[in-house]
Amino acid sequence: MNIDDHVRCIDFPCQDVVKECYQIPDVAIDPSGITMVMISEVSPLDPQEYFYAPNNPFYLQTTLQSFNDAGLNPSSITDILDLGIYITTAVKCGKAGYSISSDTISNCSGLLERELELFPNIKVIMLMGDVAIKSMNLIARRQLGDRVIPAGSTYKIRKNPYYYKNTRVFPSYIITGKNFLIEKSKRSMIAEDIGEAIKLLR
C-alpha cells in the first residue's frame, strides 16, 4: 500500500505554510507490519531533506542519530521500516514562519488521523515535539472526548504512561533540525524515550 494514495490534502486551507513543500510519505509498505508510528512536526522547506527522499536527507540523518543514541543501528529509512516503525509529520507542508498556528495544526490533524487509521497493529505512537503533541490531542478529543497528553513541559510529563485507545503514547522532543545536533540533554531524553518504546515492541 502507498500511503499517499490514501491520505491527501485537497484544498490546502492553511495560510502559514509553504504548500510547495507538501509531503505525504510516498512509500509502499505493508501497514499490518507497522507497530510504531513516530510523528515529527512539519515537512522540511526543501523536499529533498524529507525522511523518505533519496541520498541521505537531513531529516533522516538526525532521525538515524536518535536511534543510534538509543543503541539501535539503522542506516537507512528502509532499516527503520523493517523495525516496524513508520515516520511521518503532523503538519504536511513546510512552515512559512517561525511557528505554526493552531488552525493549521487542527486542519492537518485530520490528515494525520486518517493516516494513523491505516495501521491496525500500532502499539506505540511517539510525538516528537509540541506540534505533534497538539495534533495528537486534537485527534484524541475527536475520538475519545479528551486530550491524551496533559498540559505541561515535556521534561516533566514524558515519563508518565499515556494511552490513545490501547496504544501507548510517548511525548518527546523534536528530532529534526540543526538544534537537535547540539542539544545534548534533549538528545539524551529522546534516546531514553525511544529505548522505552522499543521495549514495548519486543
Image (cartoon, grey):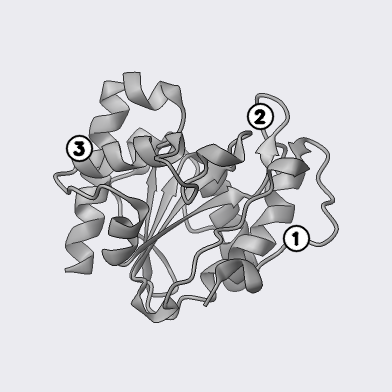
Which mark, by number, is residue 91? Answer: none
Q: CA distance from mark 1 to mark 3?
A: 34 Å
Report if residue 201 is visible in the image. Answer: yes
Residue type, mark 2 in image: Ser
The C terminus sits in image quarter: bottom left
- 177 to the left or right of 91: left
For label 2, count other residues whose C-alpha is less than 10 Å away and answer few (under 14), some (14-19) or many (20+).
few
* Label 3 crowd (10 A; few <14 / some 14-19 / many >=20): some
Q: CA distance from mark 2 to mark 3?
A: 28 Å
Amino acid at dot 3: Asp
The numbered dot on residue 99 is: 2
Q: Is residue 11 left or right of residue 170?
A: right
Mark 2 vs 1: CB contact within 8 A = no
Percent x, y for residue 93?
68, 44
Q: Nearer the viewer, mark 2 or mark 3?
A: 3
Mark found first going from the N terminus, 2 or 1: 1
Task: Name the residue: 40% across, 42% down.
Answer: 60
Q: Classify mark 3: helix, strand or loop.
A: helix
Q: Amino acid at mark 1?
A: Cys
Residue 175: horizontal and vertical position, in percent? 40, 37
The residue carrying mark 1 is 9
Q: Earlier in the sequence, mark 2 or mark 3?
A: 3
- Up-down: is 117 above or below 36? below
The disc, 1 or 3, on the residue closer to the chain's N-terminal end is: 1
Task: Residue at 65% x, 68% y: name it.
Answer: 7
Q: Nearer the viewer, residue 151 or 189?
A: 189
Where 77 sits versus 43, above or below?
below
Mark 1 lies on a secondary structure that is: loop
- Depicted 184 relative to depicted 187: above or below: above
Residue at far top of view: 182
